[in-house]
Amino acid sequence: MTDIDKESLVSEEIAPTQLSMDMTSSKRHASSSRKHRRSRKVNGALHHGDCIKIMNEMKKESVKIIVTSPPYNIKNSTGNGLKDCRGGKWKGAALQQGYDTHADAMRHGEYVQWQRDCLTSMMRVLRQDGAIFYNHKWRVQGGLLQDRHDIVDGFPVRQIIIWQRNGGINFNPGYFLPTYEVIYLIAKPKFKLTPKSNAMGDVWKISQEKNNEHPAPFPIELATRCIESVDDGLVLDPFMGSGSTAIAAELNNREWIGIDISEKYCDMAKDRIAEITGKSF
Ligand SMILES: C[S@@+](CC[C@H](N)C(=O)[O-])C[C@H]1O[C@@H](n2cnc3c(N)ncnc32)[C@H](O)[C@@H]1O
């Protein structure tokens, strides 16, 4: 269970804090926030726990931008990769064992409902001028395209961005090497991009992350593009993993909140954020 300090989630100004939230008053938050900025402390809060539970404790319409990549349920696969959770051909795949505390092998319907519940909680905390950048992957299952429409149906999808990565790990001679993922831009009515960022277009060529122990990170540059294309405001990643979104937020001097169900990944994120930004928790 999370060590969440509810106050840190509902205050107007999210104070920098530690993994286990140990601050108890908004007065302390405000003064420590000022002090932390002077002393090169991080501009954000990392929460260990279930993202729906934590998001539902956050203040409504308080977040400007959500940049996130959920587990893809990749081990529930009919294909040759991680077939039927038995391993398939990707014996060496980073996600062979699933995540630290999440097996990534739910029944399809259960997974879709879970992701819809996550999106509903994200929409609740999103400002009227905010947007969600929801990274996912299309795949073919049983000969049919699984384009994730069942997850996003009814949510205000405004655009689909293609993230063109370099090659993956599927060297099957029957298939072209998969090299893209998608980012659903799900936007509330008043959302607008910052001037000129629409010139980036809707196909983003960004190499995958290297030297990261997390099994499924996205590149810091991907999160950076999302954040830089949106005006100032609180950044949230409910599936924070190794902290890529937090690092991008820090590098752009934005305040952020990150959530992950795995304590191990929270520790990993904490170390990585400190190492790359030079800031401490
Ligand atoms: C695709 S990874 C995110 C990787 C991240 N974008 C990065 O760059 O490192 C998905 C993450 O969701 C986390 N997760 C799974 N179930 C969760 C839940 N119920 N609440 C919060 N996090 C969860 C996993 O532990 C995993 O780190």
Image (cartoon, rainbow, N blue to C red):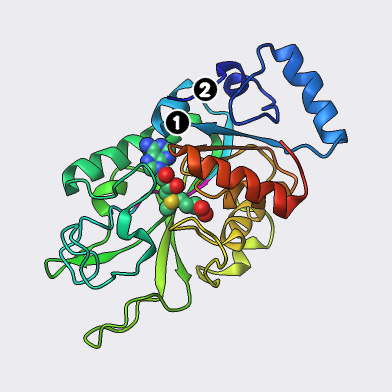
**Residue type at numbered disc 2:** Asp
Q: Secondary structure at mark 1?
A: loop
Residue 80 numbered mark, or none: none
Camera-side residue of 218 and 199 = 218
Q: Secondary structure at mark 2?
A: loop
* Residue 256 x/y as whole percent: 63, 38
| Residue ranking furthest to the bottom | 173
Whether residue 35 sits left or right of residue 137 in the image: it is right
Stretch in magenta: 67-71
Q: Is disc 1 surrounded by few (<14), some (14 to 19) or many (20+) residues within 10 Å?
A: some
The reply to whether dot 2 and dot 1 touch (C-beta < 8 Å) is yes
Label 1 residue near ligand 1, CB within 8 Å: yes
Would you identify the image quadrant in which residue 78 lies?
Answer: bottom left
Quadrant the C terminus occupies: top right
| Residue ranking furthest to the left | 142
* Residue 143 x/y as whole percent: 13, 70
Q: CA distance from mark 2 to mark 1?
A: 8 Å
Q: Is disc 2 surrounded by few (<14), some (14 to 19) or many (20+) residues within 10 Å?
A: few
| Total marks in image | 2
Q: Residue at x 73, y 38 (%)?
A: 42
**Residue type at numbered disc 1:** Gly
Residue 191 seen:
no
* Residue 214 x/y as whole percent: 48, 55
Residue 3 numbered mark, or none: 2
Would you identify the image quadrant in which residue 75 lies?
Answer: bottom left
